Image (cartoon, rainbow, N blue to C red):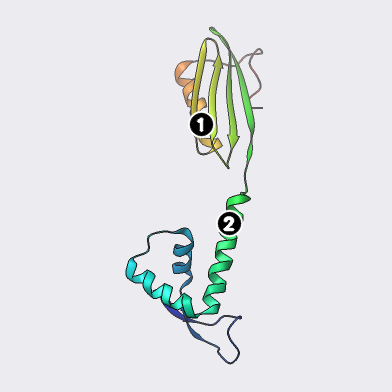
C-alpha cells in the first residue's frame, strides 16, 4: 500500500485523519531501495503538497544520517597463543563492526590473513582452521589460557 489513511499528532488543525504515504514507502525512499516509477510518482506528488509527510521523511533522513555517522560498534582485538611443534603461533582477531574484522594466524612460519564482516565469524574461522591444521593439538602449560 502506497498511501494509507492514518492519524498523526502533527495533523493540521481540524484534520484528524487523512491519506498519507505509508511508513514502509517512506523508508524505501530514504534507503533508496527498489521503488517502481509509478509508485514514486504517486509518492512524489503527495510529498509536494503534504507537510506532515515531508516532516516524516525529513525525520527518517535525519535518523538514517545519524546512524551512519554514529554506528553502535564493537571494536577490539583478541589473541590466542599456541605452542606448536613448528613454533609459537598466535591467532589474532582484530577489527570493528564499523568496518571489517581480520582473522590472522601469525608465527610458526605462517602468516594467514582473512577478512570478515563480524568478529564472531573471524574467531570461528581461526578456531576451525587451527583444528584442521593442527589435529590432536592439546594446549599445555606453554599455550595461552584461551582468548585474551
- Residue linked to disc 1: 124
120 over 20 or under it: above or below: above
Number of residues whose C-alpha sits closer than 10 Å to that of mark 2, classed few (under 14), some (14–19) or many (20 or more): few
Residue 120 in view of the camera: yes
Among the 4 quarters of the image, the one containing residue 139: top right
**Residue drawn at the location 55% of the way across and 65% of the way down:** 60
At which x and y percent is residue 61? 55, 62
92 over 111 or under it: above or below: below
Residue 135 in view of the camera: no
**Residue drawn at the location 45% of the way across and 64% of the way down:** 29
**Residue drawn at the location 36% of the way across and 71% of the way down:** 39
Q: Nearer the viewer, residue 137 or 44?
A: 44
Q: Nearer the viewer, mark 2 or mark 1?
A: 2
Number of residues whose C-alpha sits closer than 10 Å to that of mark 1, classed few (under 14), some (14–19) or many (20 or more): few
In whole angstroms, how far apart are the C-alphas of marks 2 and 1? 33 Å
At which x and y percent is residue 15? 55, 89
The N terminus is located in which quarter? bottom left
98 over 26 or under it: above or below: above
- Residue linked to disc 2: 65
Amino acid at each position: 500500500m502506497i498511501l494509507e489513511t492514518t492519524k498523526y499528532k502533527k495533523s493540521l488543525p481540524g484534520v484528524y485523519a487523512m491519506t498519507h504515504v505509508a511508513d514502509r514507502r517512506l523508508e524505501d525512499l530514504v534507503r533508496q531501495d527498489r521503488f517502481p516509477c509509478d509508485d514514486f510518482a504517486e509518492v512524489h506528488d503527495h510529498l509536494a503538497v503534504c507537510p506532515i509527510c515531508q516532516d516524516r521523511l525529513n525525520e527518517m533522513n535525519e535518523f538514517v544520517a545519524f546512524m551512519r555517522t554514529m554506528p553502535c560498534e564493537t571494536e577490539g582485538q583478541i589473541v590466542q597463543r599456541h605452542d606448536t611443534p613448528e613454533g609459537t603461533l598466535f591467532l589474532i582477531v582484530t577489527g570493528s563492526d564499523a568496518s571489517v574484522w581480520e582473522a590472522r594466524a601469525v608465527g610458526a612460519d605462517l602468516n594467514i590473513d582473512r577478512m570478515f564482516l563480524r568478529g564472531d565469524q573471524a574467531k570461528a574461522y581461526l578456531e576451525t582452521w587451527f583444528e584442521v591444521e593442527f589435529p590432536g593439538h592439546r594446549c599445555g602449560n606453554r599455550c595461552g589460557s584461551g582468548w585474551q
